Image (spheres, rainbow, N blue to C red):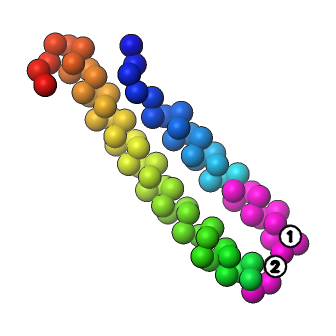
């Protein structure tokens, strides 16, 4: 029995980032001024590397949890 599923949350986060990019591109069709550029630089741009770093960390954590679960199910000691 799987005790922890990080992949579905990570997938939702990745999808949300992709959808944000699509929505932002649509918004830029009608909102293209200095304020829009400032908003993009301060709010949208920083999200991409932060989310990617978070997804990588979730992937590493999932590997550790999988290994721990295997160790426990194989009769490994804590």
Q: Classify 10 Å Cα crowding around label 2: few (below 14), some (14-19), many (20 and above).
A: few
Q: Residue at x 66, y 52 (%)?
A: 18
Question: How many dots with numbers?
Answer: 2
* Image side of residue 59 versus residue 24, left or right: left
| Location of the C terminus (image quadrant) | top left
Secondary structure found at label 1:
loop
Q: Quadrant of residue 32?
A: bottom right
What numbered label is drawn on residue 29? 1
The image quadrant of residue 67 is top left
The answer to whether the residues at label 1 and label 2 have Cβ atoms under 8 Å apart is yes
Specify the segment rendered in magenta.
Answer: 20-34
Q: Residue at x 44, y 52 (%)?
A: 54
Q: Farthest residue in the bottom direction?
A: 34
Give how far apart the Cα atoms at labels 1 and 2 are: 7 Å
Instruction: Identify the secondary structure beneath mark 2.
Output: loop
Q: What residue did someone put label 2 on?
A: 32
Give coordinates of residue 15: x percent, y percent: 63, 45
In percent of width and height, residue 30 lies at 88, 72
Position of the N terminus, as image quadrant, is: top left
Does the segment drawn in magenta span residue 60? no
- Residue at image position (51%, 56%) is 51
Relative vertical location of residue 72 with respect to residue 21 in this rendering, above or below:
above
Q: Residues within 10 Å of mark 1 (few under 14, many from 20)?
A: few
Q: Is residue 22 rendered magenta in the image?
A: yes
Q: Is residue 77 left or right of residue 42?
A: left
For image coordinates 28% across by 22% down, the residue present is: 69
Using the image, determine if residue 8 lies above or below residue 23: above
Q: Label the magenta part by its dominant secondary structure.
A: helix
Q: Nearer the viewer, residue 4 or 11?
A: 4
Q: Residue furthest right?
A: 30
């Amino acid at each position: 029995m799987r005790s922890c599923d990080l992949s579905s949350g990570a997938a939702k986060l990745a999808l949300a980032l992709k959808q944000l990019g699509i929505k932002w591109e649509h918004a830029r069709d009608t909102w293209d001024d200095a304020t829009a550029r400032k908003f993009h630089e301060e709010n949208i741009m920083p999200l991409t590397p932060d989310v990617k770093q978070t997804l990588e960390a979730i992937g590493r954590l999932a590997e550790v949890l999988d290994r721990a679960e295997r160790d426990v199910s194989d009769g490994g000691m804590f």
